[in-house]
């Protein structure tokens, strides 16, 4: 059963931690999400949608439950789940996950890489799930579609969710206590290594 669209249409800072433990399936691989980041659109200088709607960011303006995929640094794709009410851009960056089904497919996509690292980081996650330009706008809640986002089998234990600064976002909306919008499951080996931002905008 997919996550309900009205749940994903809630505030991004509530939706993001609620996605920890959720299962995401595409192209023969299923991940259990272990790390995410929240991006809050018009009120968030770190968001691609901070300056409003563009052809690139249109999918972020809803409806919730669709996939926003972008290309970064000329070599990597990263994937986000669109959240919030339609017309108000927000999204959750999928930072890391544990492969729980489709191990042979994942291994073929990530040759020579340790299983722990198959989806440890947003670009690796996108590669393991075969997310690319064609998946931008994919409805993860369509039961007939190629992608599926399912709720956690059970909520994370009390105290298991950690929060801290987002990775690689400098300046307003980046590192610091004002934007502790990265969420992860404690003691999960698939969670990516935190690196302080350098002086560049998220892209």
Image: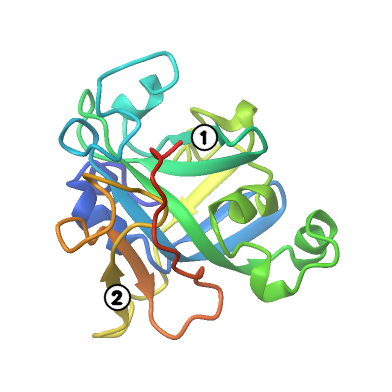
Q: Is residue 131 visible?
A: yes
Residue 183 is labelled as: none
The x, y position of residue 21, in whole percent, is 42, 69
Picture layout, residue 190 above or below residue 76: below
The residue wearing badge 2 is 162
The x, y position of residue 57, in whole percent, is 39, 23
* Tally of numbered tags: 2
37 sits to left or right of 6: right
Task: Name the residue: 35% across, 31% down.
Answer: 48
Instruction: Residue 145: name its quadrant.
Output: top right
Instruction: Residue 183: name its quadrant.
Output: bottom left
The x, y position of residue 144, in whole percent, is 56, 36
Picture layout, residue 158 above or below residue 134: below
**Residue nearest the viewer, comparing 107 with 147:** 107
The x, y position of residue 30, in whole percent, is 62, 60
156 sits to left or right of 69: left
Task: Name the residue: 62% across, 62% down.
Answer: 119
* Other residues around mark 1 within 10 Å, as few (<14) / some (14–19) / many (≥20): many
Q: Spatial distance from mark 1 to mark 2, Cα to Cα? A: 25 Å
Residue 69 is labelled as: 1
**Residue nearest the viewer, comparing 154 with 79:** 79
């Amino acid at each position: 059963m997919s996550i309900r669209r009205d749940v994903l249409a809630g505030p991004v800072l509530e939706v993001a931690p609620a996605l920890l433990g959720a299962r995401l399936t595409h192209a023969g691989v299923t991940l259990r999400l272990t790390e995410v980041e929240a991006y809050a659109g018009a009120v968030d200088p770190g968001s691609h949608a901070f300056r409003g709607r563009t052809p690139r960011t249109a999918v972020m303006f809803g409806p919730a439950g669709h996939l926003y995929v972008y290309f970064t640094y000329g070599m990597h794709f990263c994937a986000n789940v669109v959240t919030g009410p339609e017309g108000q851009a927000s999204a959750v960056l999928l930072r890391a996950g544990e492969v729980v089904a489709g191990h042979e497919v994942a291994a073929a996509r990530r040759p020579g890489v340790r299983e722990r690292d198959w989806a440890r980081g947003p670009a690796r996650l996108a590669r393991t799930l075969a997310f690319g330009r064609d998946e931008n706008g994919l409805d993860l809640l369509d039961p007939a579609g190629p992608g599926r986002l399912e709720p956690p089998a059970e909520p994370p234990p009390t105290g298991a969710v950690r929060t801290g600064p987002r990775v690689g976002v400098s300046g307003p909306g980046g590192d610091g206590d004002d934007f502790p919008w990265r969420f992860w499951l404690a003691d999960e080996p698939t969670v990516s290594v935190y690196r302080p931002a350098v002086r560049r905008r998220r892209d």
